Amino acid sequence: MPVYDISGPIREGIWKYGDAYPDFRLEHTSAEPGTFFFEIFHGMNSQTGVYLETTAHVLGYETGRMLSEVPVSALVNIPCRVLHLDRDTVYKNGGEISLAVLQKAMEGLDFPEGCAILFEAGWDNWYTPEFLTEGPWLTRESMAFLLSKKPSLLGSDTSAWQKDEPVFDLFAPTDTLLLAPLVGLDKVPGKKGFLTVLPILVEGTCCAPARAVIVEDGGSMTNENDYLSLKQWLEETKDVPLEAMDAFFNVRIGDYEDHMSQWTEHYRWMAELIPEGTKTILDIGCGTGLELDTIFARFPDLYVTGIDMAEEMLAKLREKHGKRNLTILRDDYFRHPFGESVYDGVISFETLHHYTAEEKIPLFSKICRCLKPGGFYLECDYIATSRKIEDLVFAESARRRHRDGIPDSTFVHFDTPLTLEHEMDAMRRAGFSSVELVGFLPHDNHTAMIRCTK
């Protein structure tokens, strides 16, 4: 089951709450020259990075309880609700999180007493100076409404909380814990989960830096529904003949981009994840270059090599981006040599969900070898939400191949996605130094963004 880290990294230059707070500085040192290396955290304070606080932060030490008094059992596997706020409305109103915005995000959710309520408005400016000063904020009515649900903990991706009217006087008497500012809540696809937050155990403190993760809930029921829906669709289409991969896309060029528009936000997300300073990229299964539309908008001078088997798709790509620094290859990316230490990055978007792990591992190894040291591979693709679904689609693919007399070596268009665990395992076996799930976009538990590093 996916685990989402909603903690932001601490590093030199990180924001602070004002002049009363020291600057954070990391010093590497050792007990003796060349032995027992360790680090000194200069300027570390109880509100450095993501932190958990008790109401003593507002009420004072004599009235509120200390963080060390909160039992660890109350901080592990807390049932939580994640509210994905309508960010267009929030920012149109200057960052105000109104009662109407909260109520809309809460539709269809139950709120058991003592659960954690986390809300996000996409405020993902962790490394910028305005992170503390310009984030979204709650109205007094909104805070009162949240507290009426009797949560044990409130959390958000904003650090502002209040602006035009005070809200912490409502929060303080409730003994509710507060967790902020969080990162990546918008990448948690569902609305229900279990939160674990572990602060540094320092006695006599009202708040402390913490690591927080969410394990998404509701997976079993969702996965079973996915399985039943897919099984029904496969039964309805059981007599449809398989098509060769390139032919399938060539005959659908007319409406291909309209069909793929459902992933518009994923294209933007991929472009945002490409590091500054990237100069060269290989795009495997590039098609008409929908992912490149947003990438070129951000990196107009980027050198891109795109490879695909469908000539009609590549013709559309040439039409759109022929004047860019673009090299187009009509070939099979499984067989085409990529070279050694050639590219800063490699990307693939919705192209690898037709193949087995055994087919993917050599390809992933080839991708890893073609990257420069420290290079990245970004994959955004369809995954099977359970092993049951993975087994079903591979069995059906084998049945249809046998029926149509098509050997395993021939590429056909039939979706056979791996589970997330199997996909990432294939990447690790290919030799990448790190493989991480970046996450999912809200309301989509099928399309994973994965990042690998050489």
Image (spheres, grey):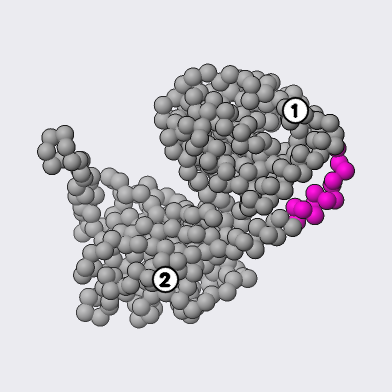
Q: Which residue is mark 1?
A: 410
Mark 1 → mark 2, Cα distance in angstroms: 54 Å
Q: Residue at x 57, y 41 (%)?
A: 423
Determine which quarter of the picture holds residue 232. Answer: bottom right
Question: Taking 449 as reference, is 226 above or below it?
Answer: below
Q: Is residue 304 magenta?
A: no
Q: Nearer the viewer, mark 1 or mark 2?
A: 1
Question: Looking at the figure, which quarter contains the N terminus?
Answer: bottom right
Query: Which x, y percent locates residue 416?
Result: 69, 41
Residue type at tag 1: Thr
Query: Which x, y percent locates residue 370?
Result: 50, 23
Magenta region, residue range: 229-241
Residue type at tag 2: Leu
Query: Which x, y percent locates residue 454?
Result: 44, 31
Query: Which x, y percent locates residue 447?
Result: 61, 47
Q: Secondary structure at mark 2?
A: strand
Judge left or right: residue 161 versus residue 266: left
Question: Taking 369 as reference, is 153 above or below it?
Answer: below
Judge left or right: residue 19 versus residue 92: left
The extreme right residue here reads 239
Q: Which mark is residue 153?
A: 2
Residue 55 shows in this picture: yes
The number of numbered badges drawn on the structure is 2
Determine which quarter of the picture holds residue 75. Answer: bottom left
| Prevailing secondary structure of the magenta residues | helix
- Badge 1 or badge 2: first in the primary sequence: 2
Q: Secondary structure at mark 1?
A: loop
